[in-house]
Amino acid sequence: MVDPALLNWTIDHIMRVLMVLIRVGPLLFLMPVFGARGVPAQVRILMSLTIALVIAPVAPITVADLPITPPGFAIFAAREVALAAILALFTRFIFAAVEIAGQIVGIQMGMMIAGVMDPQFGTQVSLVGMLWNIAAILIFLAIDGHHIFLAAMIQSYHWVGPGQLGLIGQLTYEAMMNGALQMFVLAVMIMAPAMAVLFFSHIGMGIIAKVVPQIPVLIVGMPLNIALGLLFAGLSMGYLAPLLIARFEMLGRLLPRIVAGLG
């Protein structure tokens, strides 16, 4: 015969894992790298369950916080998913900035026809964008960027209890707008060297076309722009790493403040 105390403890633990899983699962599916389309859904589900099993014993939650009515549970789940989406959004800003920079440089190089599929977002990007995107992923994993999410997830329970996320206030809205603004600023910082060289290359080709009309500028200019773009895109890797590391470290300080603001 099963001990009633053991049965109650088992049911209580399962419900706690379920409450954590509702918040951890959407975050893992929405966050960069692990939430990429190339990662099988079975792997993400297993990772979500594993993380929920680890966090559930230490998270300050009780089974009484879980609604028992279907409408209440739907609202509870919607609030948890919204919190996970807000946390994942700010990291996606950094990876989106890298992709925007690569797209613009690829257009100026004339290589948008030779696009490749981005495994994270499932969209077509330029070769330069893919190069920088892979570098951003490797940097993110090298500095244990995924630990930032786990730390923010654990701290979130101290500020925002299960299902207690209220309406998004003005501070959260301003933080999202500022994050979008910084996304474009970061994109400009990443693509600045290659764009500057390509800009002067186009000016030089225009001057040559006027001074020496016999030179086929279109035939000469395209391989020259591709060579200069690839050269300076590779040279940009030297300062891309510290730039992204600084942004990821800033994100680690920003996410707990965002969660505190939501609470």
Image (cartoon, rainbow, N blue to C red):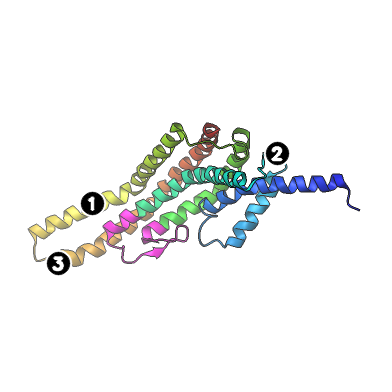
Q: Please identify the quarter of the rendering in which residue 55 is found.
A: top right
In the picture of the structure, the residue carrying the numbered disc 3 is: 216
Query: Looking at the image, can residue 62 be seen?
Result: no
From the top left corner, tell me how far across and down residue 47 is, in percent: 63, 55
Mark 1 to mark 3: distance in Å? 19 Å
Q: Earlier in the sequence, mark 1 or mark 2?
A: 2
In the picture of the structure, the residue carrying the numbered disc 2 is: 64
Residue at coordinates 49% horizontally, 53% vertically from top-left? 137
In the picture of the structure, the residue carrying the numbered disc 1 is: 199
Pick out the residue farthest to the right. Answer: 1
Nearer-the-camera pick, 178 or 219: 178
From the top left corner, tell me how far across and down residue 131 is, in percent: 41, 58
Nearer-the-camera pick, 146 or 144: 146
Label 1 crowding class (10 Å Cα cut-off): few <14, some 14-19, many 20+? some
Mark 1 to mark 2: distance in Å? 62 Å
Query: Tag 1: residue type?
Result: Phe
Mark 1 vs mark 2, foreground winner is: 2
From the top left corner, tell me how far across and down residue 40 is, in percent: 57, 63
For this view, does 82 lie left or right of residue 117?
A: right
